[in-house]
Image: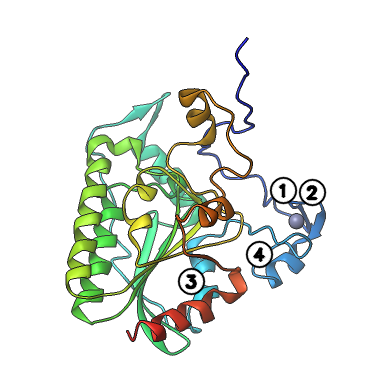
Amino acid sequence: MAKEAESKWNGFSLKRRKEMPDGLWMRCPGCEHMLYRSAVEKNLNVCPECNHHFRIEAATRIKYLVDEGSFEEILSDLTTHDPLGFKYRGTTYKQRIKADEKKCGAKEAMRIGKAFIKGRGIVLGAMEPNFLMGSMGFVVGEKFCAAVDKAIEELLPLVVVCCSGGARMHEGVVSLGQMAKTSAALAKLDEAKGLFISVLTDPTTGGVTASFAMLGDCLIAEPGALIGFAGPRTVAETIKVELPEGFQTAEFMLEHGFVDMIVHRRDLRSEIARLIDYCKK
Ligand SMILES: [Zn+2]
């Protein structure tokens, strides 16, 4: 009998992760310890016991990353329409958007704007994992390209924090088109000799990995982040082999040359600032 590929992975879930339930205490999925929520929050949402990096929303990410109060958001009102009249299991795309808007307060899965990191001007993009799983539809593609244009126009480095389940199925081929669009925009940035630092956080998958996430001049990953195209179970079932330990983790990606460095959340600011100086941008 053929050996069954072992994988605990159950596919990408559109549900909000249960790892951050409301209350005083929380359980760390990394070490199973019960932790004081406030202690974790004080530690930039990183487990003080095992260094597990919790998933964070765009607003928190921006707060951690940039100089206090320096983020000037642009295109915050850009919202998607429903190009396909999409409906899945009785729920329409429009209903999903409304529900996620209400749940996380975001209007789309990416926020962009200008900011400073340790006094260095940048154009920043931060993906919103709680809005349709940070998926890339028309608006995310459009915002990303606007951020690239701004970086070219003002000769600023572009920093994008990726956190995404991939292309947004609700927009079908329109979503897939964003892969080509964002990649073409980055080719323009490259011609203009711009700098693009891509920060890969848990999870960076699907069409986002297959387009702009991997096109950074420098790829920084957070420890333990899931980075890949298709999920491990799909890969295991397709190629019918047992996957190596740690498959698709940031550490595995570093070992195999897919990312340049793994940086702890507390060091991201100084590391990005150092890279900007090093590249003389
Ligand atoms: Zn832990």
Disc 3/disc 2 C-alpha distance (Å): 28 Å
> At label 2, which amino acid type do we have?
Glu
The quarter in which the C terminus is drawn is bottom left
Looking at the picture, tell me which residue is in the foreground, 257 or 196. Answer: 257
The quarter in which the N terminus is drawn is top right
Q: Is mark 2 within 8 Å of ligand 1?
A: yes
- Colour scheme in the image? rainbow
Closer to the chain start, of discs 3 and 2, is 2
The relative height of residue 259 versus residue 38 in the rendered view (above or below) is: above
Dot label at residue 165: none
The residue under the point 49% across, 49% down is 227
Dot label at residue 29: 1
The residue under the point 72% across, 48% down is 29
Relative horizontal placement of residue 67, taking residue 19 as reference (left or right) = left
Disc 3/disc 4 C-alpha distance (Å): 13 Å
Residue 13 is situated, as x and y percent measured from the top left of the image, at 53, 37
**Labels 1 & 2 near each other (Cβ < 8 A):** yes
